[in-house]
Image (cartoon, rainbow, N blue to C red):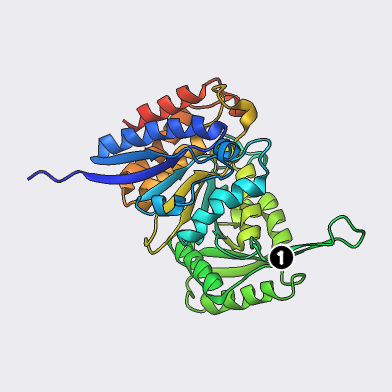
Amino acid sequence: MDVPQRDYRIASIPGDGIGVDVVAEARKVLDRAAARYGFGLEWTEFDWSCERYSRTGTMMPEDGIERLSVFDAIFLGAVGFPGVPDHVSLWGLLIPVRRAFAQYVNLRPVRLLPGTSSVLKDRTAEELDMVIVRENSEGEYSELGGRHGSGHPGEFALQESVFTRVGVERIIRYAFELAGTRSGRLVSATKSNGIIHTMPFWDEIFAEVAADYPEVGAEQCHIDALAARMVQHPDRIDVVVGSNLFGDILSDLAAAITGGLGMAPSGNINPPGEYPSMFEAVHGSAPDIAGKGIANPVAQILAGAMMLEHLGEHAAARAVSGAVETALAAGEAATPDFGGHATTTESGTAIAEAVG
């Protein structure tokens, strides 16, 4: 008896700059994996971007969230372009999607891949393999606050952070669950010696949740000391959980020491699966090299592997990740940012062929 083919509806938002270039290559790889493993990816592309903002005054239409709600996942390229302030592009597209769909986990795996090297001397792939679990829906990235007395000597700006018990507990619990599937080591990024209200609150909830996971080695570490440890002793770090701001900073640092942002994928996850999750590369839109054929598609392709894993296509996800490693190890996928000579298209093609 034939097994019906599984089809997934994917919203593709290439965005700006090299986002367009790398999403095209990632889709090529993912389509190859889908064909090999017996499922379909039905892509619907949206032109939501800074270019659209320049034409219409909005990053996405008013019913954008409603239109995305029918999809199984969202595949996002990089967003940003000169002339459009970053806060406009961020708050006009990415953050509204994250919050409307309760994507409260920002998951950023970072590891040293074959054929690449770290800026940290003599560090191996076994020592550079960690996951940053970033709270993605509240914390320091809040709309509360404002600017007062504009243009006067006493002008000031006020920015409020929002930490709720529900929000803090669920991200910390997610991190403990993840650590239990890996090395059993978890460190919480804090700064309770300087931030007097929110960070002690975070620390107290971390300690409460830790009591439910005695098998996980848990510790708290001030973010400045943790950043230093990430550089000096990365082998002592496996899973890190942090607030929206701390997780954002630490994940970029982790990417920098494991090959760079061109290798760093991320997922904006709604763990219960009530809404679509969104997958993207960590890097920016790099408009100065857009269309030149030198952008590195690896981060976007690995974000695609994360999407397949989230959809339950575990074998296909492993095949895509393995294909990246195979092509990089063979030197066939290295773009100029890693000392290689492959174009964006050649890199994507080499990885797609390795899937098959």
Find numbered disc 1 in the image and state the secondary structure of the residue it sits on: strand
Can residue 114 be seen by looking at this rendering?
no
Tell me the residue at 37%/40% (across/down). Answer: 44
Q: Which x, y percent locates residue 277? A: 42, 54
Q: Is residue 141 above or below residue 79?
A: below
Residue 269 in which image quadrant: bottom left
Q: Is residue 8 left or right of residue 115?
A: left
Dot 1, crowdedness within 10 Å: few (<14), some or many (≥20)? few
Q: Is residue 153 left or right of residue 294?
A: right
Q: Quadrant of the C terminus?
A: top left
Q: How many marks?
A: 1
Looking at the picture, tell me which residue is in the foreground, 135 or 161: 161
Q: Is residue 322 above or below residue 237?
A: above
Can residue 82 be seen by looking at this rendering?
yes
Looking at the picture, tell me which residue is in the foreground, 141 or 84: 84
Q: Which x, y percent locates residue 252? A: 63, 48
Q: Residue furthest right?
A: 153
Q: Is residue 189 above or below residue 51?
A: below
Q: Is residue 72 left or right of residue 150?
A: left
The amino acid on which the numbered mark 1 sits, given as a three-letter code, is Gly
Q: Which x, y percent locates residue 278? A: 45, 50
Residue 341 in which image quadrant: top right
Q: Residue furthest front?
A: 56
Q: Quadrant of the N terminus?
A: top left
Tell me the residue at 29%/38% (across/down). Answer: 34
What residue did someone put label 1 on? 145
Q: Which x, y percent locates residue 126? A: 53, 47
